[in-house]
Amino acid sequence: MNLFRRFVVVGLLSTVLDVALFVWLRQDVGWAVPVADGVAVATATLVSWLLHGTITFPGDPRVRWYRRSGPYVASSVVALFVDVAIVTVLDMALDPRTAWALVVIKLPALGVAFLARTANYRRYMYDTVRDDQREPARRPPPPGRYRLSVVIPAYRESDRIADTVARVRAELSSLGASALQIVVVDDGSDDDTADRAQAAGADLVLRERPNRGKGAAVRAGMLAAEGRTVAFTDADLSYPPEQLLGFVDAIEGGWDVAVGSRQHQATMTVVRAGRLREVGGRIVNVFTGIVLLGRYRDTQCGLKAMRSDVARLVFGRTQIDGFAFDVEVFHLVERYRLTLIEVPVHVVNSSRSTVHVVRDAFLLLRDLFRVRAIARMGDYELGPGEPLPDPAPGPDGS
């Protein structure tokens, strides 16, 4: 049984227990409505906590939150008072005399209490996730032939891919020629993008057929790269490549993942994106709450880096081929308890972009729900024996 089904089953069992116990205590035992409802809610909450912690969430980031009894109790107490208050008011207004009438006044209370509990859950889970991510993990050095691999997904970029490769190599020359690998992934272009990348000196050129999307291209490059730090950036170089030196320092300083943030207070934007694109990006960041537990300034920045072993772990599980792959990456970073630092970037937005704001925003939102569905089906859960870096301990040692 996958995670979502386990969650639903445990939730239904707890709800049935809550309602049945309330009706029995009120009808058969004769307790006052507030007392009967309070005992029923408290009992169902305890059972729910035990079942979710042992059955529903093993291997899931939320299990860490369930092990923190303080926040869970605080959320449950708020939900209990909300439930009891609503049931008491409805009892006074409607004066239910039968078991079914008691069920009727209980249902609105269950709904409102669920919303209150969910809001608190997300707030505490956010704190838990960010606690995990807040400090460098300082794991042993990852494997790799190169110090840095730069993955460049490209689609119909024949007119500028040679300049892109040359500029990346020039601006990262301080690493040394033997320390840098440039990987270009031609995502099904119908021009000579791949040939020109090869001629320009890219160390590895992958030809993906047919065109599948940026997520698929980045995945192929990240899994093929041989650097100890693996990064990806856009072919238009909206983020000047020299910034990757700072990302390498972050990864070598102990962080599992370093992500660029255009919303960071230290970010410098030389050429701004169009107004519609900026607004669309902010709306997308709001909707990432559908999938992510943590709150991030910018999930869609095209400049990210990670350890090679983390890259293989994360991109070995990604399934989204479109622009929402970034959010999928964040979700897996949370799920696998990897540390993450947001880095300010220098942005020079290109006047030529393959992004179609309305169409791509719709497709991205669709894929956000796909990520949630995949998670519910349990497809992101690691199987026995699959590699997972030792988790960085949280502040409570969990």
Image (cartoon, rainbow, N blue to C red):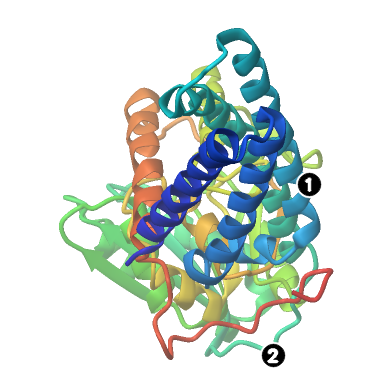
Q: Nearer the viewer, residue 106 or 111?
A: 106
For this view, does 143 lie left or right of residue 104? Answer: right
Q: Is residue 335 above or below residue 104?
A: below
Q: Read off the residue under disc 1.
A: 74
Question: In the structure shown, which secondary structural element does the residue marked by tag 1 occupy?
Answer: helix
Percent position of residue 112, x then y: 58, 27
- In the rendering, at what x and y percent does residue 129 appear? 68, 58
Q: Residue at x 67, y 89 (%)?
A: 141
The residue positioned 69% from the left and 73% from the top of the image is 251
- In this orientation, which residue lies closer to the viewer: 328 or 381? 381
Residue 70 or residue 208, whichever sits in front: 70
Q: Is residue 187 above or below residue 37?
A: below
Residue 153 visible, this orientation: no
Query: At label 2, which amino acid type do we have?
Result: Pro
Instruction: Identify the mark at residue 140; answer none if there is no mark.
Output: 2
Question: Residue at image x 57%, y 13%?
Answer: 95
**Residue 290 visible in rendering:** yes
Image coords of residue 288 (percent x, y): 52, 40
Seen at 41% across and 66% down, the residue is 380
Disc on the earlier residue, 2 or 1: 1
Question: Mark on residue 203?
Answer: none
Q: Quadrant of residue 275?
A: top right
